Image (spheres, helix red, strand yellow):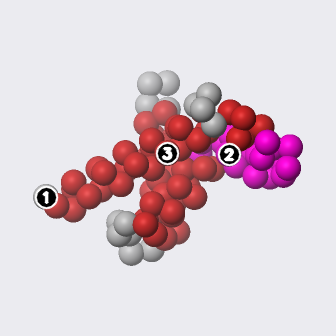
């Protein structure tokens, strides 16, 4: 049961950070500045699917990895975001 709770907390953290950074008005000026500085990084901050991969890796580094493999954690974060955002289509 503890593993399930840890996964749910990890998932909500990844999804929350991703939505806040890529879509919120709070981060809009930062996304614009970064886009002016580097088109690649600007695209990364504007793409929820791309950003969730790296956010999942960072959350896994800050906490405990879900899979024991950071690449798989990144894929899990992106896949989870993709599943949740495209579920209603």
Cα gap from disc 3 to disc 2, whole angstroms = 11 Å
Mark 3 and mark 2 lie on one chain; the one further toward the N terminus is 3
Q: Residue at x 21, y 62 (%)?
A: 3
Q: Tell me what residue is drawn at x 59 percent, y 45 percent.
A: 49
Dividing the picture into quadrants, the one containing residue 6 is bottom left
**How far from the left and from the top, in percent, is residue 30?**
71, 41
Q: Name the residue under label 2.
A: 45
Mark 3 and mark 1 residues within 8 Å of each other at the beta carbon: no
Q: How many marks?
A: 3
Ranked by sequence position, the earlier of labels 3 and 1 is: 1
Q: Is the magenta stretch mostly helix, strand or loop?
A: helix
Which residue is nearer to you in this view: 72 or 62?
62
Q: Residue furthest left?
A: 1
Graded by Cα atoms within 10 Å as few (under 14), some (14 to 19) or many (20 or more), the crowding at tag 1 reads: few
- Going from N to C along the chain, the mark reached first, 2 or 1, is 1
Mark 3 highlights which residue? 17
Q: Mark 1 points at which residue?
A: 1
**Please, which residue is most extreme toward the top here?**
89
SS type, badge 2: helix
Asked whether the residues under the numbered discs 2 and 1 touch, taking CB atoms below 8 Å apart as contact, a structural biologist would say no
Measured in 3D between alpha carbons, the distance from the residue under mark 2 to the one under mark 1, in whole angstroms, is 34 Å
Spot occupied by residue 16 in the image (x, y as percentages of width and height): 45, 41
In the rendering, at what x and y percent does residue 19 appear? 52, 37
- For the record, the magenta segment spans 33-49
């Amino acid at each position: 049961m503890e593993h399930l709770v840890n996964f749910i907390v990890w998932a909500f953290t990844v999804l929350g950070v991703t939505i806040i950074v890529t879509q919120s008005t709070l981060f809009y000026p930062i996304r614009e500045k970064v886009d002016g500085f580097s088109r690649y990084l600007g695209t990364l901050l504007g793409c929820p699917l791309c950003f969730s991969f790296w956010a999942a890796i960072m959350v896994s580094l800050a906490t405990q990895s879900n899979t024991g493999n950071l690449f798989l954690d990144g894929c899990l974060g992106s896949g989870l975001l993709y599943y949740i955002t495209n579920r209603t289509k």
